[in-house]
Each structure stands twice: as structure tokens, then as C-alpha cells.
């Protein structure tokens, strides 16, 4: 069973992963419109991967007898000044996600939630990628 604090934090991370999918899909759409199909394809794959990450959180919350609470997703940026800006923003976004995973990891350590800690090891490693 999840502590209330951890359940809320996992739900926030679930929303962040879904937001990431939205961000990358918007970036992919921009690249498609700019006739950059290789960039668009790569960003679309990143979007799909983020949905997979979100579903891992979804399933984990349920597996731990928590309650999934889906949040409203903020509209992503649609316009970029250049492909370079797309990838700069993607890097900044990944840094924010890495920070959020680190904060979540710290929370489960503080809560002494060893099952969540072990489960989050995969995400900590994934963010290094």
C-alpha cells in the first residue's frame, strides 16, 4: 500500500510522463511541417516511449493499491524558431524530468518505501540514457 504522499508524487510523475509525450508529439508535428521527416520520426518515437513510461506509473500505482488520478495536461508549445530550438527545449525538458525522478526517488527513500525505491531504479537509470 502506498503512503498518501508517495501516491500523490507518483500521480504527478504520471502526469509529467504524459506531458512529455505531448511535448514530443508537438515537436514532431513541427518537424513534419518543416519537412524534416527524420527528426519528426525520432520525436514521435520519443513520444511513444513517454506514453510507455506513463503506463508503467499507471500500473505501479494500481499494483500498490493506490488510486490513479489523471491531471489536466498543459498545452505544449507549437511554434519553434528552428530545429535547434526544438532540440534545446527537448534537452531542457529531459533535465526537468530527470529532476522530478530524483525528487520522487528522494521521497520514497524518506518514506522508507523500499518497493517503490527498487521500482524507481529503472527510471533513474533510464534518465541517464
Image (tube, rainbow, N blue to C red):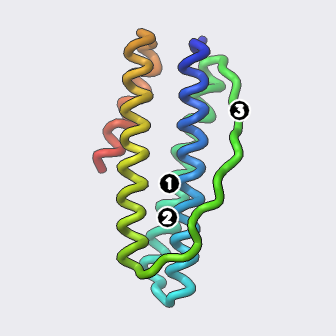
Tell me: residue 63, above or below residue 79. above
Residue under the point 42% across and 81% down? 82
Secondary structure under badge 1? Answer: helix
Mark toward the viewer: 3 or 2 = 3
Closer to us: 59 or 24: 24
Residue at 71 percent of width and 32 percent of height: 69
Q: Are marks 1 and 2 in contact (CB under 8 Å)?
A: yes
Which residue carries the number 2 mark? 45
Compared to residue 76, the image places residue 116 above or below, namely above
- Determine which residue is flagged by label 3: 69
Residue 77 horizontal side relative to residue 93, left or right: right
Alpha-carbon neighbours of circle 1 within 10 Å: few (<14), some, or many (≥20)?
some
In the displayed structure image, the side of residue 26 where residue 40 appears, left or right: left
Q: Earlier in the sequence, mark 3 or mark 2?
A: 2
Label 3–label 2 contact, CB within 8 A: no
* The label number, if any, that marks residue 58 in the structure image: none
Above or below, 13 against 66 in this view is below
Task: Decide: is 20 above or below 105.
Answer: below
Pinpoint residue 33: horizontal percent, then vertical percent.
56, 86
The span from disc 3 to disc 2 (Cα, nearest Å) is 26 Å
Q: CA distance from mark 1 to mark 2?
A: 6 Å
Cβ atoms at labels 3 and 1 below 8 Å apart: no
Q: Residue at x 37, y 39 (%)?
A: 99
Q: Quadrant of residue 123?
A: top left
Quadrant of the drawing holding the N terminus: top right
- Helix, strand, or loop for circle 2? helix
Q: Position of residue 113 (x, y in %)?
A: 45, 13
- Residue carrying label 1: 49
Front tag of 3 and 1: 3
Residue 86, image x, y percentages: 43, 71
SS of the residue at dot 3?
loop
Amino acid at each position: 500500500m502506498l503512503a498518501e504522499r508517495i501516491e500523490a508524487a507518483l500521480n504527478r510523475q504520471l502526469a509529467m510522463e504524459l506531458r512529455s509525450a505531448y511535448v514530443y508529439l508537438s515537436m514532431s508535428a513541427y518537424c513534419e511541417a518543416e519537412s524534416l521527416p527524420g527528426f519528426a520520426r525520432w520525436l514521435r518515437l520519443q513520444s511513444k516511449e513517454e506514453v510507455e513510461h506513463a503506463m508503467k506509473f499507471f500500473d505501479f500505482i494500481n499494483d500498490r493499491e493506490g488510486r490513479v488520478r489523471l491531471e489536466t495536461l498543459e498545452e505544449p508549445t507549437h511554434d519553434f524558431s528552428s530545429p535547434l530550438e526544438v532540440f534545446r527545449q527537448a534537452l531542457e525538458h529531459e533535465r526537468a524530468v530527470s529532476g522530478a525522478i530524483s525528487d520522487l526517488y528522494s521521497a520514497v527513500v524518506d518514506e522508507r518505501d523500499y518497493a517503490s525505491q527498487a521500482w524507481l531504479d529503472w527510471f533513474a537509470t533510464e534518465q541517464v540514457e
